[in-house]
């Protein structure tokens, strides 16, 4: 928002929003006011001294639109990325950032047994609590959108240690392949 001030000598200057206070200019709603959807389509009133002007601009509150997601990233990896074969995957700690068509973002945190209003929009290639086997070793967990599986991201590589037992002439050895 910018305002052009003209004095009685017909001299003018343009004042940017950041300089309003220094120039004695106030607005309704006030600068840094917390706005809500109820403020949609309301005009902005600008005051300097006894002069008041209402702008032709109106307030438009833009909220995150989960039906128009255009991007997804893994913000935080799951707390655990190294497992022994036969253990259940635990996605706790993983945070996914969704971006909508307006550039607004929402973070979705995975917590065992907790579902948020946005977690229903996301699916993972390996589900939370799935039992991990040798086939999961050195794989990524792909995170995608339910409504558009082409919008996806991935975690860092998952490590699943494979146990083995070998025997030779009555001697048995147990171990883990790293």
Image (cartoon, rainbow, N blue to C red):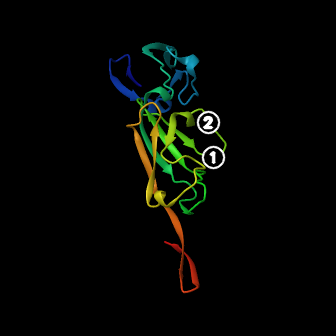
Q: Is residue 116 left or right of residue 69?
A: right
Q: Find numbered disc 2 in the image and state the secondary structure of the residue it sits on.
A: loop
Q: Is residue 128 left or right of residue 73?
A: right
**Residue 15 percent location from the top left of the image:** 39, 28
Q: Find numbered disc 1 in the image and state the secondary structure of the residue it sits on.
A: loop
- Taking depth in this image into account, of 167 and 159 the one nearest to the observer is 167
Q: Is residue 2 left or right of residue 48?
A: left
How many numbered badges does the structure rendering display? 2
Residue at x 49%, y 61% (from the top left corner): 134
Q: Is residue 160 above or below residue 33?
A: below
**Residue 94 percent location from the top left of the image:** 55, 50
Label for residue 42? none
- Is residue 65 visible in the rendered image? The answer is no
User: Badge 1 is on which residue?
Assistant: 111
Residue at x 59%, y 45% (from the top left corner): 110
User: Badge 2 is on which residue?
Assistant: 116
Q: Earlier in the sequence, mark 1 or mark 2?
A: 1
Residue at x 56%, y 63% (from the top left corner): 85
- Taking depth in this image into account, of 162 and 71 the one nearest to the observer is 162
- Label 1 vs label 2: CA separation? 9 Å
Residue at x 57%, y 59% (from the top left corner): 80
In the rendered image, the quadrant that contains the N terminus is: top left
Q: Residues within 10 Å of mark 1 (few under 14, many from 20)?
A: some
- Is residue 85 visible in the rendered image? The answer is yes
Q: Is residue 70 above or below residue 96?
A: above
Q: Residues within 10 Å of mark 2 (few under 14, many from 20)?
A: few
Q: Is residue 169 above or below residue 109?
A: below
**Residue 136 percent location from the top left of the image:** 48, 57
**Residue 160 percent location from the top left of the image:** 51, 63
């Amino acid at each position: 928002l910018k305002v052009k001030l003209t004095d009685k000598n017909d001299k003018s200057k343009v004042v940017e929003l950041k300089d309003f206070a220094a120039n004695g200019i106030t607005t309704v709603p006030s600068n840094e006011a917390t706005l809500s959807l109820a403020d949609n389509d309301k005009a902005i009133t600008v005051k300097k001294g006894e002069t008041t002007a209402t702008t032709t601009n109106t307030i438009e509150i833009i909220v995150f639109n989960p039906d128009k997601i255009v991007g997804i990233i893994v913000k935080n990896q799951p707390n655990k990325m190294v497992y022994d074969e036969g253990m259940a995957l635990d996605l706790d700690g993983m945070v996914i950032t969704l971006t909508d068509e307006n550039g607004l973002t929402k973070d979705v945190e995975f917590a065992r047994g907790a579902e948020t209003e946005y977690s229903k929009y996301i699916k993972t290639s390996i589900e939370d609590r799935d039992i991990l086997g040798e086939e999961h070793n050195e794989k990524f967990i792909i995170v995608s959108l339910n409504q558009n599986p082409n919008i996806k991201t991935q975690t860092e590589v998952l490590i699943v240690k494979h146990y083995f037992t070998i025997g030779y002439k009555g001697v048995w050895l147990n171990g883990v392949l790293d």
